[in-house]
Image (cartoon, coloured by chain):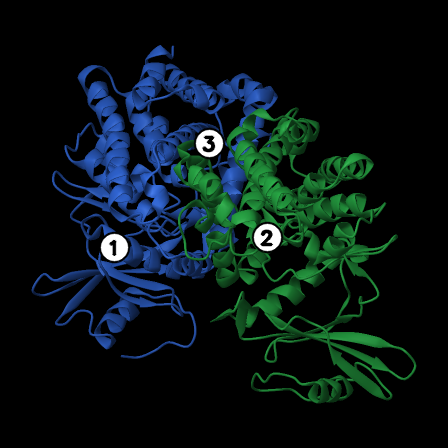
Chain colours: A blue, B green
Amino acid sequence: MTTATQYKELTNTTAIAYAKDNSLLNGNITCEEIGDGNLNYVFRLVNDIGDSIIIKQALPYAKVVGESWPLTLQRATIEAETLKKHGEFVPAYVPRVLHTDAVLAITVMEDLSHLTIARDGLIAGHHYAHLAQHIGEYLAATLFFTSDFALHPFEKKRLQVAFSNPELCKITEDLIFTDPYYDAPTNDFEENLRSTVEALWQDNDLQREVAKLKRHFLTQAEALVHGDLHTGSIFVDAQTTKVIDPEFAFYGPIGFDVGQIIANFTFQWLTRQGEDRQKTAADIATVWHVFETTYRQLFTEHYEEHYAKVAGYLDDHIADIFVDTLGYAGAELIRRTIGLAHVKDLDSIENNALRLQKKQQTLQAGSFIIKNRRNISSIEGYLAHLEDIR
Amino acid sequence: MTTATQYKELTNTTAIAYAKDNSLLNGNITCEEIGDGNLNYVFRLVNDIGDSIIIKQALPYAKVVGESWPLTLQRATIEAETLKKHGEFVPAYVPRVLHTDAVLAITVMEDLSHLTIARDGLIAGHHYAHLAQHIGEYLAATLFFTSDFALHPFEKKRLQVAFSNPELCKITEDLIFTDPYYDAPTNDFEENLRSTVEALWQDNDLQREVAKLKRHFLTQAEALVHGDLHTGSIFVDAQTTKVIDPEFAFYGPIGFDVGQIIANFTFQWLTRQGEDRQKTAADIATVWHVFETTYRQLFTEHYEEHYAKVAGYLDDHIADIFVDTLGYAGAELIRRTIGLAHVKDLDSIENNALRLQKKQQTLQAGSFIIKNRRNISSIEGYLAHLEDIR
């Protein structure tokens, strides 16, 4: 094994050499870069007997929509350590980390390229029978076991320091909680949406509640959240679910992860019809119910203080998470429609009138649930509201 | 200047040598240890022209009521850095730090021994005309300027890591939020209080709300709080207020500091009569009103995001702080009556029946305001409730 003392971008050739030097793969190796090159290199290495690995390397910059800005390489360490930490609790739902290298910002992982990115599969009309169940379990276990209910306070605070992630959090703070709510240069929306967007900017009730969500995101250190849990961060097939890319992980609000993934299923709900839509509705309900049921079970089994037995305490806690979940779901619906980073679920709709209608609906739904999140008491209530949108 | 490479307890002689070696004081120096020796040495050094300094050295253990347990020396660094950070915003209300030494766990400060500990002065019946005003300003400035409203998110998160304080926080988590609420060996209460205490242990509504306060304390990283802001942590005279001993500082809930000091004024309210009581009531109201007014002013002047102008946002934030303040005040009232660390305000009452009555009242008040904190809308409402206690 060789140890790099300085960061250097890998090439196909040096990626192969790196794998050999570190005994990660033997034999005759071929290598292909399969990432989009905006934030990371993703090298897939295969040898002559078909064994394969992924070498992911963070790049010292981020490119989004032609813009490029410097971005900490520390995110590779955050990502690898989060995969390992979450992997302690849900090994089935995260990729195995085989090797890490902080200097080169490298994480070597099991190869999951036989799986499909959930967003792509869902947009193509597929339904994954176990996805919602798996995500509910993933959420409950990763969030519960990294919370104060499960950890000694020294260990929780140690992890909170280790996963301090200012640069990546700032991206979320800006792109989800700030820029979409005023005329910021990072915003990106269709001109036909302008009057709706300007109405959001003038909506004092919405602004007031989003300001609270932002403050909550900045201050609420509940659990080691994934921080970017959309359907583009999930690999799937009929049996398997693997959550990838936790570069945005930090100690934050539990409802952030739950809300973000529910919003991303909601894009599918909004763009699907008939039976397909009902399957998505069932998935949204399943994500929440499995999360809640599993989290309650873990709390009952593992939280050892006498407060664990206090009638109503867990109910109140779950109710708080649900309110947060709705708020963060609403924020995700809005920012994916008018902010810097869009979703293909909406943007790939070719019919202009239909696409515009769907975007109007996401904005309407997002704004409504942010403002009314304390008055919606169940995931069925959330789905009923979606049905009311015209 | 000499640099120690290993911790060693100072003596009067080595304290003088240390002051000379580090050019902290010149001339013929005499030294006296004036601390209580339970957690720290406090050396007062005076030279022949009357200049004086304080050398405070953390001890590697804590002694409380005969018990002794190891305690991190890092708290000296936390204390010194908090004094310096808070001193940026309220130099008039904290001692000047002249020198620090992490290895020896030493903080050298201006000598404030001409001042009186506020608790002692208040118990002796004094009233300090500026104390409440000063504390209100201290709270507003230290808490606002270390919050996300005032700091760049990178700087806030840097400070949050630097002030991670697991061992001292654990003491608070145990002694304020856990042990008083079940039959824990650390509790210490008069046998005549037992039936009242056991009623608290059986009070599900109280347990449910204290569990939430504990979780809030563990997760809510709002500002660099003092963490132990009782009247024993304040030096006073007729003109001067100096807040000392922030060893428990960490990024925590704003309402914790505000509530703790209000509770400690409340012990005085409960034990005073007539005009003296009215002065204390006015002080309690002043602490809150000056805090609120100053905090609002700082928010308006220094918070630069567009959310600063959103109608109602600051009102909601202040209302949240007030609810937290009442909850933490209630927890302080209870733990100082039945937990490990008592207050002289109550324990020094010699008449058994009167002392017992006052302790019953603190428990009644504490339990009531914790359970009803969301329904008390002003500090006057809090004081009115105190008037109702029998």
Instruction: Please tell me how crowded label 3 is: few (under 14), some (14-19), or many (20+) other residues with Cα within 10 Å.
Output: many
Q: Is residue A139 above or below residue B101?
A: above
Q: On the same chain: label 3 and label 1? A: yes
Please give the label number shown on residue B156. 2
The percent coordinates of residue B145 (x first, y second) are: 69, 48
Q: Are marks 2 and 1 in contact (CB under 8 Å)?
A: no
Dot 1 alpha-carbon crowd within 10 angstroms: few under 14, some 14 to 19, many 20 or more: some
Q: CA distance from mark 3 to mark 2?
A: 25 Å
Residue occupying the point 36% across, 47% down: A226
Residue at the right extreme of this rendering? B49
* Residue type (three-letter) at the residue carrying disc 3: Arg
The reply, left or right, for residue B33 in relation to residue B60 is right
What amino acid is at disc 1? Gly
Q: Nearer the viewer, mark 3 or mark 1?
A: 1
Q: Establish if B119 lies above or below A318.
A: below
Location of mark 3 (residue):
A335
Q: Do the CB atoms of the residues marked 3 and 2 lie less than 8 Å apart?
A: no
Element under label 2?
helix
Q: Tell me the element at label 3.
A: helix
- Taking depth in this image into account, of A304 and B348 the one nearest to the observer is B348
The mark that comes first in sequence, 3 or 1, is 1
Tell me, for residue A87, which label it has, or none: 1
Residue B42 in picture, x, y percent from top left: 69, 74
**Mark 1 chain:** A
Pinpoint the chain carrying mark 3: A
**Which label is found at residue B328?**
none
Seen from the viewer's position, the closer of residues B199 and A306 is: B199
Query: Which label lies toward us, 3 or 2?
Result: 2
